[in-house]
């Protein structure tokens, strides 16, 4: 028989094993289910469940359960501050119910299962409750302070493991989403050449940068580069919604200023709290001119075949989601044969300790006449080099071929 000293030590060893490396291959739901099995065995209880706070911060959602799997299958949601789990999250403190009844438990599943006693503790991260871990017994039970402490220790480990895994899943989901929204292939337009690059920044965590090239039935070709403020899955999702809305409005107008005004109204009505910069240029069916409008985005750079690259004098209007009363302007940009236009997001030119003007000068120096794809690669090589960018980088080059259809060769 274990001594009074050996028993707590054994329990602590078992808790320390809760997040061992053997669980590293599991997804969030599978990880939580395995952790709950270990917690249930550890405290010798009949049920165990994890509820996580949803993105709104208003509800706890049943995410994993053992002994009361119905919670997850039925999509149980508990309002913050109400019921057993809601009180734990609101108080950010353990709650013990020695006798479960209608007055202290909101979830009918807990009562229908015949659970007599409950112990729950908050999942904490950075001083905030991100969820609840609770266990239950089918017999009346007096949970002790030592058991509460053990469950809280287990909850702390569950919170760490869950957040780490959620970050991994969120990054993978955001990367997949962003790749699916960026054009797999740029359109073929006679007399034109397009090329692009995208590189995630911030340690690989994607954000809301995007580029797009598409045509409409009128024969106009839309060339777009944008950047939704923020990082991670939320920025990527918002980017996807803005990209879709912009394409829809492009079927209604070929005026880029009007299009961005409509997109701004969309952001203000449907995307509260979102701010984005966008540069939209519309190529005429004759391909000899673009008309561009800039919503707070860095200016494009033009590359003539016989002169240094220079920044286009394009008046910047406010970003989307800032002030709907300010007008938006459209500016024509000639595109003679052999000329190119280079669009980009601010991650290409911004570096800590240097002003964006320095980055733009470096960009102009890196640009030269040549095949669009090769020039995009050259710019990324010279401006990013071996250093990972702090922010996402999206670049898009629009090049009008020479009159005879021949491309421009790279300088030697």
Image (cartoon, rainbow, N blue to C red):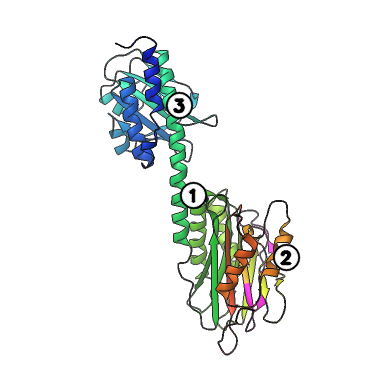
Question: Local crowd at mark 3 within 10 Å, few (<14), some, or many (≥20)?
Answer: many
Asked if residue 75 can be seen in this view, the reply is yes
**In 3D space, how far apart are the residues under numbered discs 1 and 3 (Cα atoms)?**
25 Å
**Secondary structure type for disc 2:** helix
Q: Which residue is mark 3?
A: 122
Q: What span is in magenta?
A: 316-341
Our reading of the magenta stretch's main secondary structure is loop
- In the displayed structure image, the side of residue 26 where residue 125 appears, left or right: right
Q: Which mark is residue 176?
A: none
Quadrant assignment, res 22? top left
Residue 336's x, y, as percent? 64, 83
Q: Which residue is mark 2?
A: 361
Q: Which residue is mark 1?
A: 233
What residue lies at 43% left-to-right and 35% top-to-bottom?
161
User: Image height check: is 304 above or below 154?
Assistant: below
Foreground residue, 327 or 188? Answer: 188
Identify the mark nearer the N-term, 2 or 1: 1
Identify the mark nearer the N-term, 3 or 2: 3
**Secondary structure type for disc 1:** helix
Residue 15's x, y, as percent? 39, 25
Residue 277's x, y, as percent? 61, 58
User: Image height check: is 159 above or below 400?
Assistant: above
Quadrant assignment, res 397? bottom right
């Amino acid at each position: 028989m274990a001594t009074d000293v050996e028993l707590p030590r054994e329990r602590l060893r078992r808790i320390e094993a809760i997040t061992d490396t053997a669980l590293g291959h599991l997804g969030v739901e599978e990880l939580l289910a395995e952790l709950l099995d270990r917690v249930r065995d550890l405290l010798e209880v009949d049920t165990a469940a994890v509820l996580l706070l949803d993105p709104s911060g208003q509800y706890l959602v049943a995410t994993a359960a053992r002994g009361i799997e119905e919670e997850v299958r039925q999509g149980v949601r508990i309002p913050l501050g109400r019921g057993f789990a809601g009180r734990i999250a609101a108080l950010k403190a353990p709650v013990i119910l020695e006798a479960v009844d209608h007055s202290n438990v909101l979830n009918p599943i807990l009562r229908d299962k015949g659970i007599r006693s409950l112990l729950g503790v908050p999942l904490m991260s950075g001083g905030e409750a991100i969820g609840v871990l609770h266990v239950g017994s089918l017999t009346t039970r007096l949970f002790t302070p030592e058991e509460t402490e053990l469950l809280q220790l287990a909850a702390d480990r569950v919170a760490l493991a869950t957040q780490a895994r959620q970050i991994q899943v969120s990054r993978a989901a955001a990367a997949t989403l962003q790749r699916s929204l960026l054009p797999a292939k740029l359109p073929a337009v006679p007399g034109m050449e397009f090329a692009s690059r995208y590189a995630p920044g911030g340690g690989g965590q994607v954000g809301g940068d995007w580029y797009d090239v598409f045509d409409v039935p009128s024969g106009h070709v839309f060339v777009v580069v944008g950047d939704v403020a923020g990082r991670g899955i939320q920025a990527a999702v918002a980017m996807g919604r803005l990209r879709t809305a912009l394409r829809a409005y492009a079927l209604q107008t070929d005026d880029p200023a009007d299009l961005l005004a409509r997109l701004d109204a969309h952001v203000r009505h449907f995307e509260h709290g979102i701010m984005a910069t966008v540069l939209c240029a519309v190529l005429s069916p004759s391909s000899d001119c673009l008309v561009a409008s800039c919503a707070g985005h860095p200016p494009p750079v033009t590359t003539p075949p016989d002169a240094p690259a220079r920044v286009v004098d394009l008046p910047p209007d406010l970003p989307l989601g800032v002030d709907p009363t300010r007008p938006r302007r459209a500016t024509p940009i000639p595109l003679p044969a052999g000329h190119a236009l280079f669009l980009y997001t601010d991650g290409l030119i911004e570096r800590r300790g240097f002003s964006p003007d320095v980055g733009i000068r470096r960009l102009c120096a890196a640009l030269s006449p040549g095949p669009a794809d090769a020039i995009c690669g050259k710019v990324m090589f010279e401006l990013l080099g071996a250093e990972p960018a702090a922010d996402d980088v999206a670049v898009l080059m629009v090049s009008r071929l020479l009159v005879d259809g021949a491309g421009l060769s790279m300088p030697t």
